């Protein structure tokens, strides 16, 4: 057991690191390369501290001071590890990305750290108002990162869409919070759970309506089916490292708080499971349909992100609130993050100046010119498609077995079908890379160190995670 | 009884102002109509005995945030000819009402089920500046402290997106 | 129900109704003699004002306005703190110091960044 201060230490390190990077930016003495290394240092240190913390049962750090609003458990610890790793690898691939794309300032890394701060808070918050503020910290920083390139019209369009719809989701969250408070008299998860256990869930229309609005906000943030339309343009408009960060860190944080909120009480979870069941199926198939039609690589990855949200919703349907560990969700998030971050790290250095290589055709014959990069991308794609022996395969296996053991056999079958469908667009890129003559030499992408190193580490992670056993 | 009448009056003002915000063609008229909503909300807070929120609503919302909104409208320098034609906007309005109607009915049901005014959550001194202060700085410490992070993010964001950039090294 | 709050609510109605009412009544009841010279803005002998009232502003104004807003919100949090400082004691003092130090770093940032320099 670690003491309360050390448990909060990763959060403090990222927060202080973000402020330090902000101040460094004002003094104009540090190059952006140094800033990116400082950012890697911050994330690496926070990761190690988070890793060294041991947690038995859920801990409420500084119960009296924070009034029980933060809860740290093994679930939040692992979610935090994934988020910090995402921040680390994002800084790493941004280091190379900004050698070819010329719009970086030191504040970029400060904002990455700030949003990680919000994400960590989001995983730990067990109180709706804190959830709202941490969600806003995270989203606000991400909006700015999406629109960082002021000269780029597509980035401006992306940030506009994202900001408008994100504000909409935030409004749903506050409305839901108000209604839950009206129905229960508290915004703390623990007290909401007690109230539901005492008086039932469906007997309280204000609580049902409030929970519905809160779920709408979360579903929007993870781009689940009826709220998925924004994701394609936003992912496409953002810079490659930012897209990778959004697709992984943000999703991890929101799924963590989603699971935390869903398991406050068994009747509440059971009330939503039927709807989540249909949503997860629709999310998977709509995502697949969109992905199949794409010619741009980033748009395809955005659409495949929707599909992965569908799988994670299956895992949410299958969690039980009696002995909640969330290990399946986190395992899948970890596996998905590694694959996605890897591809975006590769795109960061292979994309060229101003991200000129975007479509499937641009990567034709990559294996002839850059065999190692092509092999890495192929491994990430196979992991996301769920081919053994990668992490993605194990993640899907755990999700499907947990769905079957929760009695959701239909969901497991749909998951497998969707997985087969997704092969179509993942294999298309692999075929493009391996079975075509090289159209160009990719000469401009030769002299980078950090992003290729990042892809290499992530390839190792793909296999290492697949060997790590978890209890379902 | 008199207070009930005032409450209804303010509610009507708030809704009319919000409708005007959506329906006015020129953004400046919309913004002015929004001021009505904000002031009406301040009136509602006053009737609910929330003194601090009443003051903040007037100072921060109707004052600072409204002037920011008007600033932004001024930057864009929108002339009559810049505005889109908005053909068939009432068709969209009716369509939107039909789409939103179920949510509205759900909300009505939820709000009706809330404990009425006979339930006393408001103790003596509810909503006073001092009482809010004591509650905010003891029970609600965490949200208060992380608001500072949120403000820092928006500060950096404003400088990054609207300010002049440092040199790229 | 506090009487002073009901009164201030009425005052709000007064602002929202009476002021526009009087202004529009003045238009009808008051004497009006139009004319180009009379409607011309006059400013200390400078004959013509430049442009219209809705002309474009520099984005620098926006930056100042939003920075003002941020520190305005900081100040708003200090009202309830200042009023309840005796009840909160040193604990409340510490948390306000933490809050202000965090925002002070933001102030240092914008000062050093030269955001407030009008160039």
Image (tube, rainbow, N blue to C red):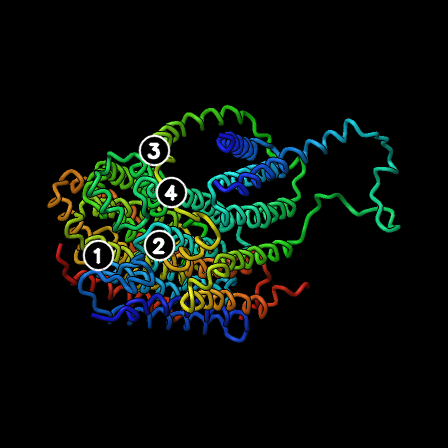
Q: Name the residue under label 4.
A: A178
Measured as percent of width and height from the top left, residue B120 is found at 36, 41
Spatial CA span between label 4 and label 3: 11 Å
Q: Which of A334 and A365 is in front in this view?
A: A334
Spatial CA span between label 1 and label 3: 37 Å
Q: Name the residue under label 3.
A: B110
Name the chain letter of the residue that bears numbered label 3.
Answer: B
Name the chain letter of the residue that bears numbered label 2.
Answer: A
4 vs 2, front mark: 4
Secondary-structure class at tag 4: helix
Q: Mark 2 points at which residue?
A: A250
Spatial CA span between label 4 and label 2: 24 Å
Secondary-structure class at tag 3: helix
Spatial CA span between label 4 and label 1: 33 Å
Secondary-structure class at tag 2: helix
Tell me the tag on residue B3. Answer: none
Spatial CA span between label 2 and label 1: 16 Å
2 vs 3, front mark: 3
Spatial CA span between label 2 and label 3: 31 Å
> Residue drawn 50% across and 73% down?
A31
Name the chain letter of the residue that bears numbered label 1.
Answer: A
């Amino acid at each position: 057991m670690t003491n309360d201060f050390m448990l909060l230490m990763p959060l403090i390190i990222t927060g202080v690191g973000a402020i330090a990077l902000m101040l460094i930016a004002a003094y104009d003495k540090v190059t952006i390369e140094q800033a990116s290394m400082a950012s890697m240092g911050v994330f690496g240190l926070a990761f190690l501290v988070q890793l060294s913390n041991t947690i038995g049962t859920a801990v409420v750090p500084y119960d009296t001071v924070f009034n029980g609003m933060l809860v740290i458990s093994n679930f939040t610890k692992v979610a935090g590890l994934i988020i910090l790793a995402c921040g680390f690898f994002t800084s790493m691939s941004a280091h190379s990305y900004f050698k070819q794309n010329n719009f970086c300032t030191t504040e970029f890394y400060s904002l990455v750290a700030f949003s990680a701060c919000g994400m960590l808070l989001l995983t730990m918050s067990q109180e709706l108002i804190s959830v709202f503020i941490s969600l806003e910290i995270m989203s606000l920083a991400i909006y700015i990162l999406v629109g960082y390139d002021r000269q780029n019209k597509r980035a401006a369009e992306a940030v506009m869409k994202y900001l408008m719809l994100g504000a909409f989701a935030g409004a749903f969250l506050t409305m839901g919070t108000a209604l839950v408070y009206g129905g229960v008299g508290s915004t703390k998860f623990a007290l909401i759970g007690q109230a539901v256990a005492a008086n039932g869930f469906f007997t309280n229309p204000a609580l049902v309506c409030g929970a519905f609005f809160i779920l709408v906000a979360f579903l929007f943030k993870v781009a689940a089916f009826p709220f998925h339309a924004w994701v394609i343009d936003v992912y496409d408009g953002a810079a490659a490292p930012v897209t990778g960060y959004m697709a992984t860190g943000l999703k991890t944080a929101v799924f963590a708080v989603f699971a935390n909120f869903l398991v406050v009480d068994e009747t509440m979870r059971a009330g939503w499971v039927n709807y989540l069941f249909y949503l997860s199926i629709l999310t998977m198939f709509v995502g697949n349909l969109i992905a199949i039609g794409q010619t741009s690589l980033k748009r395809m990855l955005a659409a495949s992100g929707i599909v992965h949200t569908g799988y994670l919703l299956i895992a949410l349907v299958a969690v039980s609130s009696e002995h909640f560990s969330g290990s399946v969700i986190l395992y899948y998030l970890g596996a998905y993050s590694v694959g996605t971050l890897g591809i975006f790290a590769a795109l960061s250095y292979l994309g060229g100046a101003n991200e000129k290589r975007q479509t499937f055709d641009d990567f034709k014959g990559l294996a002839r010119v850059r065999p190692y990069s092509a092999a890495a991308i192929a491994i990430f794609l196979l992991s996301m498609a769920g081919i053994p022996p990668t992490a993605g395969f194990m993640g899907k296996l755990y999700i499907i077995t947990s769905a079957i053991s929760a009695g959701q056999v239909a969901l497991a079958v749909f998951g497998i079908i969707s997985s087969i469908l997704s092969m179509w667009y993942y294999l298309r890129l692999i075929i493009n890379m391996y079975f075509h003559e090289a159209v160009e030499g990719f000469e401009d992408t030769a002299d980078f160190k950090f992003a290729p190193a990042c892809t290499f580490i992530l390839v190792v992670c793909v296999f290492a995670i697949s060997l790590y056993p978890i209890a379902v | 009884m008199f207070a009930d009448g005032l409450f209804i009056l303010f509610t009507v003002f708030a809704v009319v102002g919000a409708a005007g915000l959506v329906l006015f063609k020129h953004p400046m008229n919309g913004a002015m109509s929004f001021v009505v909503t904000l002031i009406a909300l301040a009136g509602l807070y006053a009737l609910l005995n929330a003194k601090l929120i009443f003051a903040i609503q007037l100072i921060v919302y109707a004052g600072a945030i409204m002037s920011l909104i008007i600033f932004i409208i001024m930057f864009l320098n929108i002339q009559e000819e810049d505005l889109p034609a908005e053909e068939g906007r009432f068709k969209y309005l009716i369509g939107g009402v039909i789409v939103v109607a179920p949510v509205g009915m759900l909300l009505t049901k939820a709000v009706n089920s809330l404990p009425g005014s006979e339930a006393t959550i408001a103790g003596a001194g509810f909503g006073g500046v001092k009482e809010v202060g004591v509650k905010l700085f003891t029970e609600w410490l965490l949200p208060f402290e992380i608001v500072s992070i949120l403000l820092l993010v928006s500060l950096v964001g404003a400088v990054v997106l609207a300010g002049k950039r440092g040199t790229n090294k | 129900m506090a009487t002073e709050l009901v009164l201030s609510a009425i005052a709000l109605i007064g602002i929202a109704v009476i002021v526009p009412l009087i202004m529009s009544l003045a238009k009808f009841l008051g004497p009006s003699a139009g004319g180009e010279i009379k409607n011309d803005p006059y400013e200390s002998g400078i004959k013509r004002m430049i442009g219209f009232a809705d002309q474009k502003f520099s984005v620098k104004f926006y930056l100042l306005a939003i920075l003002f807003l941020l520190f305005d919100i900081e100040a708003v949090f200090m009202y309830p703190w200042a009023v309840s400082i005796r009840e909160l004691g040193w604990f409340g003092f510490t948390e306000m110091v933490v809050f202000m130090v965090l925002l002070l770093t933001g102030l240092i940032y914008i000062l050093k960044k030269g955001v407030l320099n009008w160039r």
